Amino acid sequence: MSQTQPRLCIEPIDTGLGLRKQAGDAIKRAIMGMDIYGHADEIRLDERQLSEALGVSRTPIREALSVLAQEGFVRAIPRRGIVVVRKTKREIVEMITVWAAIESMAARIAATAAPAHEIAGLTGLMDAFADDPSEHLTEYSDANMAFHRAIIRLGDIELMSSLTDNLFIHMRAVRAVTMTQDNRAQRSIADHRAIIAALQARDAERAEKLVREHTLDLAAHVQRHGDFLDKPLIGRVNLGLITNETGGM
């Protein structure tokens, strides 16, 4: 795993609006943009530094972190403070399985109901890459998750999108790590193109099947190769100090 410390990238908020919600949304976006599994350090958030970076008092920061803890993004640990949640291998496999169920149903709905131009838009996410995107794995990892989230949006059921928001942070980070293993990037592009073809053919059964198998293949891969998820953390990275530097995978 990379020894480069990740950066929590966040922007100051508009103090004229609800501070707790804005602070929570800003911190959540920053966490979702981080690489939380590509290194072995604990990621700790510091209220004071968050307050300074966002330009607000510590009260809305504390309230926002409490909400994020309820949503499963962060956890308060006695004598260690607030840390970004990292899942175990078993939890990740379970999350991928849930994602597969939701996304495959979204694909089935999209095949029969999504506008043709929106389905065609999925092709654009893949067109930027050749059959072997190994030279651009960071960019492809982002495009890959954008592809899967787009399918869920094409299902046009808001609850599907909201249910997968919490899963996204872990799915994105784990996919970024596994994308470098076992030629998964090349196979991923081939799978995506087959999924697009099924959607364009309005073949709901095939689209559902391909999406489900594609995502469950990731679950099987993590089951075989995800022991790194259960290794004890070797240190601590304090990411409360927020800059405009771009972190990520």
Image (cartoon, grey):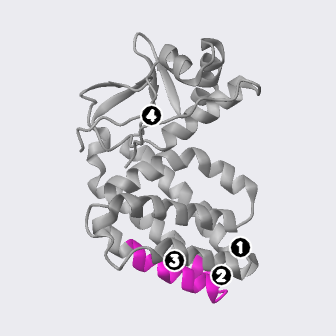
Crowd band around label 4 with a 10 angstrom C-alpha radius: few (<14), some (14–19), many (20+): many
**Which residue position is annotated with label 3?**
210
Q: Nearer the viewer, residue 213 or 79?
A: 79
Q: Please tell me the numbered disc located at residue 204.
A: 2
Q: What span is in magenta?
A: 188-207
Residue 72 visible in rendering: no
Q: Which is nearer the N-term, disc 2 or disc 1?
A: 1
Residue 14 falls inside the magenta stretch: no
- What residue is shown with label 1? 109
161 vs 50, nearest the viewer: 50
Element carrying mark 4: loop
Mark closer to the chain start, 3 or 4? 4
Rounded to the nearest angstrom, the CA distance separating label 4 from label 2 is 40 Å
Direction from residue 128 to residue 71 in the image, left or right = right
Residue plotted at (56% across, 40% down): 29
Q: Distance between the Cα atoms at labels 3 and 4?
A: 35 Å
Q: Which residue in the structure is indicated by mark 4? A: 8
The numbered disc on residue 191 is none
First along the sequence among labels 4 and 1:
4
- Which secondary structure is most common in the magenta stretch? helix
Q: Earlier in the sequence, mark 3 or mark 2?
A: 2
Left or right: where 89 falls relative to 125: left
Q: Earlier in the sequence, mark 4 or mark 2?
A: 4
Q: Is residue 84 left or right of residue 201?
A: left
Instruction: Kindly identify the amino acid type of the residue bearing the numbered disc 3.
Output: Leu
Q: Which three-letter amino acid code belongs to the residue tagged 2?
A: Ala
* Position of residue 219 measured from the top left corner of the image (x, y, whole percent): 41, 59
Q: CA distance from mark 4 to mark 1?
A: 36 Å
Q: Are marks 2 and 1 in contact (CB under 8 Å)?
A: yes
Name the spot of residue 122 as percent of width and height, x first: 57, 74
Q: Which of the two discs, 4 and 2, sits closer to the camera? A: 4
Q: Position of residue 160 (x, y in %)?
A: 68, 56
